[in-house]
Amino acid sequence: MQEKILVTGGAGFIGTHTVIELIQAGHQVVVVDNLVNSNRKSLEVVERITGVEVPFYEADIRDTDTLRDIFKQEEPTGVIHFAGLKLSVNLPVFLLPTMTTISLELLVF
Protein backbone atom coordinates (compact mmCIF):
# COMPACT_ATOMS: atom_id res chain seq x y z
CA MET A 1 0.00 0.00 0.00
CA GLN A 2 1.33 3.42 -0.96
CA GLU A 3 1.51 5.69 2.06
CA LYS A 4 1.14 9.46 1.98
CA ILE A 5 3.79 10.94 4.25
CA LEU A 6 3.75 14.56 5.38
CA VAL A 7 7.26 15.86 6.07
CA THR A 8 7.56 19.00 8.19
CA GLY A 9 10.81 20.82 7.52
CA GLY A 10 10.92 18.94 4.23
CA ALA A 11 12.75 21.70 2.35
CA GLY A 12 15.76 21.53 4.66
CA PHE A 13 18.90 19.43 4.24
CA ILE A 14 17.73 16.34 6.12
CA GLY A 15 14.16 16.81 4.94
CA THR A 16 15.00 16.86 1.24
CA HIS A 17 17.14 13.74 1.51
CA THR A 18 14.31 12.00 3.34
CA VAL A 19 11.77 13.13 0.74
CA ILE A 20 13.92 11.64 -2.04
CA GLU A 21 14.19 8.32 -0.20
CA LEU A 22 10.45 8.22 0.49
CA ILE A 23 9.59 8.89 -3.14
CA GLN A 24 12.09 6.30 -4.35
CA ALA A 25 10.48 3.82 -1.93
CA GLY A 26 7.14 4.43 -3.65
CA HIS A 27 5.47 6.78 -1.18
CA GLN A 28 3.56 9.97 -1.88
CA VAL A 29 5.10 12.91 -0.06
CA VAL A 30 3.73 16.27 1.05
CA VAL A 31 6.10 18.93 2.40
CA VAL A 32 5.30 21.64 4.94
CA ASP A 33 8.07 24.17 5.59
CA ASN A 34 8.14 27.83 6.56
CA LEU A 35 11.42 28.31 4.63
CA VAL A 36 13.10 30.10 7.54
CA ASN A 37 16.09 27.71 7.49
CA SER A 38 15.66 26.39 3.95
CA ASN A 39 14.87 27.34 0.38
CA ARG A 40 12.09 26.40 -2.06
CA LYS A 41 14.75 25.69 -4.70
CA SER A 42 15.86 22.62 -2.76
CA LEU A 43 12.49 21.02 -3.54
CA GLU A 44 12.93 21.86 -7.21
CA VAL A 45 16.13 19.80 -7.07
CA VAL A 46 14.20 16.96 -5.41
CA GLU A 47 11.64 17.10 -8.21
CA ARG A 48 14.38 16.99 -10.87
CA ILE A 49 16.05 14.00 -9.18
CA THR A 50 12.85 12.02 -8.66
CA GLY A 51 10.76 13.21 -11.58
CA VAL A 52 7.88 13.69 -9.14
CA GLU A 53 6.14 16.97 -8.34
CA VAL A 54 6.05 17.34 -4.56
CA PRO A 55 3.03 19.10 -3.05
CA PHE A 56 4.42 21.96 -0.97
CA TYR A 57 2.85 24.20 1.66
CA GLU A 58 4.77 27.22 2.88
CA ALA A 59 3.47 27.22 6.43
CA ASP A 60 4.69 27.35 9.99
CA ILE A 61 3.67 24.38 12.13
CA ARG A 62 2.95 26.82 14.95
CA ASP A 63 0.00 28.04 12.86
CA THR A 64 -2.37 25.34 14.05
CA ASP A 65 -5.32 26.42 11.91
CA THR A 66 -3.29 26.20 8.71
CA LEU A 67 -1.74 22.90 9.79
CA ARG A 68 -5.18 21.44 10.50
CA ASP A 69 -6.34 22.58 7.05
CA ILE A 70 -3.35 20.89 5.42
CA PHE A 71 -4.06 17.66 7.31
CA LYS A 72 -7.72 17.76 6.25
CA GLN A 73 -6.83 18.41 2.62
CA GLU A 74 -3.96 15.93 2.29
CA GLU A 75 -5.04 13.21 4.76
CA PRO A 76 -1.52 11.86 5.33
CA THR A 77 -1.11 8.34 6.68
CA GLY A 78 2.15 9.26 8.40
CA VAL A 79 4.25 12.22 9.51
CA ILE A 80 7.98 12.76 9.75
CA HIS A 81 8.67 15.83 11.86
CA PHE A 82 11.90 17.68 10.98
CA ALA A 83 10.62 21.24 11.47
CA GLY A 84 12.75 23.14 13.91
CA LEU A 85 14.36 26.44 14.64
CA LYS A 86 18.11 26.89 14.90
CA LEU A 87 17.62 28.41 18.33
CA SER A 88 16.28 25.08 19.56
CA VAL A 89 19.80 23.63 19.45
CA ASN A 90 21.27 26.35 21.65
CA LEU A 91 18.33 27.09 23.96
CA PRO A 92 15.95 24.12 23.82
CA VAL A 93 14.17 25.11 27.05
CA PHE A 94 13.12 28.40 25.41
CA LEU A 95 11.12 26.48 22.79
CA LEU A 96 9.62 23.86 25.12
CA PRO A 97 6.22 25.61 25.33
CA THR A 98 6.01 25.71 21.52
CA MET A 99 7.02 22.06 21.19
CA THR A 100 4.52 20.84 23.76
CA THR A 101 1.55 22.99 22.79
CA ILE A 102 1.89 22.82 19.01
CA SER A 103 3.94 19.86 17.84
CA LEU A 104 2.71 17.27 20.28
CA GLU A 105 -0.91 18.31 19.92
CA LEU A 106 -1.01 17.86 16.15
CA LEU A 107 2.09 15.83 15.35
CA VAL A 108 2.33 12.76 17.49
CA PHE A 109 5.77 11.22 17.19
Image: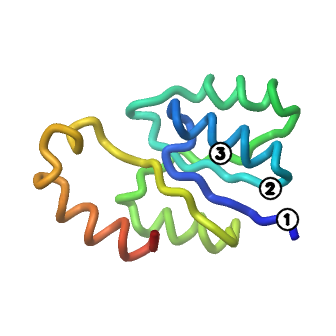
The quarter of the displayed image where residue 77 is located: bottom right
Mark 1 nearby-residue class (10 Å; few <14, some 14–19, many ≥20): few
**Tag nearer the camera, 3 or 2:** 2
- What amino acid is at disc 2? His
The tag earlier along the polypeptide, 3 or 2, is 2
Question: Residue shown at 36%/72% (left/top)?
Answer: 104
In the picture of the structure, the residue carrying the numbered disc 1 is 2
Q: Nearer the viewer, residue 100 or 109?
A: 109
Placement of 24 over or under 103, stated as above or below: above
Residue 74 location, x and y as percent?
70, 66
Residue 57 location, x and y as percent?
59, 48
- What amino acid is at disc 1? Gln
SS for tag 3?
Answer: strand
Q: Nearer the viewer, residue 63 or 15?
A: 15
- What amino acid is at disc 3? Phe
Distance in Å between CA atoms under marks 1 and 2? 5 Å
Question: Residue shown at 17%/50% (left/top)?
Answer: 92
Placement of 59 over or under 3, stated as above or below: above
Placement of 39 over or under 55, stated as above or below: above
Distance in Å between CA atoms under marks 3 and 1? 19 Å
Q: Nearer the viewer, residue 93 or 53?
A: 93
The quarter of the displayed image where residue 80 is located: bottom right
Residue 8 location, x and y as percent?
51, 51
In the picture of the structure, the residue carrying the numbered disc 2 is 27
Q: Which mark is residue 63?
A: none
The tag earlier along the polypeptide, 3 or 1, is 1
In the picture of the structure, the residue carrying the numbered disc 3 is 56
Residue 84 location, x and y as percent?
35, 46
Left or right side of 48 for 5:
left
SS for tag 1?
Answer: loop
Circles 1 and 2, Cβ within 8 Å, touching? The answer is yes
Q: Nearer the viewer, residue 36 or 94?
A: 94
